[in-house]
Image (tube, rainbow, N blue to C red):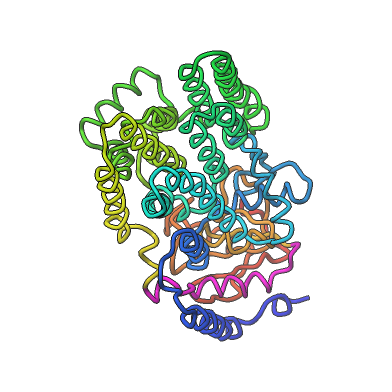
């Protein structure tokens, strides 16, 4: 079988892609009300559209697709993107993602994870909304719930691939609403599964347990202490046992992002005073609640997450971007509701004050909206599918399912549900030999190398016997010839 038999000619690909693009754009633009942002449905739309606009990446969406695909096929969770046959439990302890396996088996697509994440995020807003409606009435309850759904932390998470913390959001919401309404046993019960979301979430469980241990009187305090021990125990087990056991180098590599504690604290204090990105994140976390959340002890639940992020020497953890602030939005809005309820109960806030606080929260949400991902939706470009996405689909259909692809990081999610995929240029941990190389030449991914690095890796591939078959919408496709040598 020749290369021509395996794949469409360059002319066929280039001719087919615009037709696909025209049909998709036409369908989207003819949809009544498509350009009107709505909480819940809009964040889901923005997340899926981001994938179709090539805003997703192999790191991290591709990793989670491979992980959950492994679960769906009754295999240990592995991702070739992290390294050939790499067990993902050796990177992060997140076994809860296995819950998506049955759904992924039915809907075999990267978009399945994005939709699931949006639904989990929206689900966290339900107990918060019900609590707010019960305390303040329907109007203010809707304002608070909408402000949560539209909050910068939630949008940032849904704008950046899929992550396991999506499971923490509804669990945490149920736990904190129960805690705020003095239902301590449900609060502890909803917190317990958080240890299976990610290794650091045990610290959050411990914080909830300690609040219960110090809050009520009687036997309930014992259960609070036991819950705190449960959380801390799983942190130690994951970090010192499970992750090193499953990792390639017998260690917890994420721990290297935390330098010695003394220098951590001094650097964090200096950064907050000096106004680095940690100060911006802290300000935005409180501003989203009109600074009212400070009044609630529920805000203490955020301390473990804020502490490890701000103490880290990885500045990406400090910033109000990516997915790191999603669970903090749940905590802050629960603290907001609790703070207003407490202030009203103690006579520190009258009904007019409650309305003023709701207005402040709504104003912040509306003012921030133009700077957030949902701002793309009202425009026609916000619904436009990137021509490269359609080209990638054609390329994917032309490559046999049993053949391996190495693709640019921003193209990996377009292939990962249908093929074995690694990132191009290949990383040292990738020992596979791809049958195909698919490189984004017009919009370089910028990682794991820059555009110059891509060119060098392509030169090596061509010298090793790969040949360029065609180019479509700036995507270059190479096939391995029978005499090719390993480019890894």
Q: Quadrant of the N terminus?
A: bottom right
Q: Residue at x 41, y 73 (%)?
A: 35
Question: Residue 472, how many percent across, how many down?
Answer: 53, 76
395 in the magenta segment: yes
Question: Residue 260, how many percent across, how many down?
Answer: 40, 20
Based on the displayed image, in which of its 4 quarters is residue 262 positioned?
A: top left
- Please state the extent of the stretch shown in magenta in the rendering: 379-402
Task: Report whether residue 238 is seen.
Answer: yes
Is 134 in front, or is 456?
Answer: 134
Hey, which residue is sitting farthest left in the picture? 274
Is 381 in front, or is 70?
Answer: 381
Q: Is residue 366 above or below residue 180?
A: below
Is 28 in front, or is 265?
Answer: 28
Position of residue 379 in the picture relative to residue 25 (left or right): left
Q: Residue at x 28, y 31 (%)?
A: 347
Position of residue 410 in the picture relative to residue 366 (left or right): right
Q: Is residue 214 above or below residue 54?
A: above
Q: Residue at x 57, y 35 (%)?
A: 198
Q: Is residue 68 above or below residue 434?
A: above
Position of residue 280 in the picture relative to residue 476 (left or right): left
242 in the magenta segment: no
Task: Report whether residue 155 is seen.
Answer: no
Question: Residue 256, how many percent across, how many down?
Answer: 48, 28
Q: Residue at x 33, y 20 (%)?
A: 263
């Amino acid at each position: 079988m020749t290369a021509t038999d395996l794949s469409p000619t360059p002319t066929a690909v280039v001719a087919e892609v615009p037709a696909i693009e025209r049909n998709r754009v036409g369908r989207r633009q003819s949809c009544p009300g498509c350009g009107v942002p709505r909480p819940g449905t809009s964040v889901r739309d923005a997340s899926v559209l981001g994938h179709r606009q090539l805003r997703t990446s192999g790191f991290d969406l591709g990793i989670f697709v491979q992980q959950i695909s492994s679960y769906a096929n009754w295999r240990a969770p592995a991702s070739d993107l992290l390294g050939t046959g790499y067990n993902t439990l050796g990177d992060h302890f997140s076994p809860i993602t296995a819950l998506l396996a049955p759904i992924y088996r039915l809907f075999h697509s990267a978009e399945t994870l994005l939709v699931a994440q949006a639904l989990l995020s929206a689900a966290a807003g339900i107990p918060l909304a019900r609590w707010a409606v019960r305390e303040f009435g329907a109007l203010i309850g809707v304002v608070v719930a909408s402000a949560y759904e539209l909050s910068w932390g939630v949008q940032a998470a849904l704008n950046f691939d899929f992550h396991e913390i999506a499971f923490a959001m509804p669990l945490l919401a149920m736990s904190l609403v129960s805690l705020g309404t003095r239902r301590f046993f449900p609060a502890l019960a909803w917190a317990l599964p958080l240890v299976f979301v990610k290794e650091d979430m045990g610290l959050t469980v411990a914080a909830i347990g300690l609040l219960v241990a110090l809050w009520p009187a009687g036997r309930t305090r014992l259960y609070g202490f036991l819950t705190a021990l449960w959380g801390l125990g799983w942190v130690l087990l994951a970090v010192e046992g499970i992750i090193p056991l499953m990792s390639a180098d017998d260690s917890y590599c994420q721990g290297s992002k935390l330098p010695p504690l003394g220098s951590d604290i001094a650097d964090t204090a200096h950064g907050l005073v000096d106004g680095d990105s940690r100060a911006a994140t802290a300000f935005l976390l409180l501003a989203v609640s009109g600074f009212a959340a400070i009044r609630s002890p529920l805000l203490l639940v955020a301390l473990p997450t804020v502490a490890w992020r701000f103490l880290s020497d990885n500045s990406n953890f400090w910033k109000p971007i990516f997915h790191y602030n999603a669970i903090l939005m749940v905590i802050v809005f629960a603290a907001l509701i609790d703070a207003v309820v407490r202030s009203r109960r103690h006579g520190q806030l009258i009904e007019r004050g409650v309305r003023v606080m709701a207005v402040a929260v709504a104003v912040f949400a509306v003012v921030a909206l133009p700077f957030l991902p949902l701002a793309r939706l009202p425009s026609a470009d916000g619904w436009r599918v990137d021509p490269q996405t359609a080209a990638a689909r054609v390329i994917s259909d032309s490559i046999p399912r049993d053949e391996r692809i190495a693709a640019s990081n921003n193209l990996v999610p377009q292939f990962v549900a249908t093929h074995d995929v690694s990132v191009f240029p290949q990383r040292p941990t990738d020992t596979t030999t791809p049958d195909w190389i698919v490189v984004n030449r017009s919009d370089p991914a910028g990682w794991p190398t820059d555009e110059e690095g891509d060119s060098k890796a392509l030169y090596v591939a061509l010298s090793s016997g790969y040949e360029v078959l065609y180019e479509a919408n700036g995507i270059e496709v190479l096939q391995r010839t029978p005499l090719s040598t390993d480019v890894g």
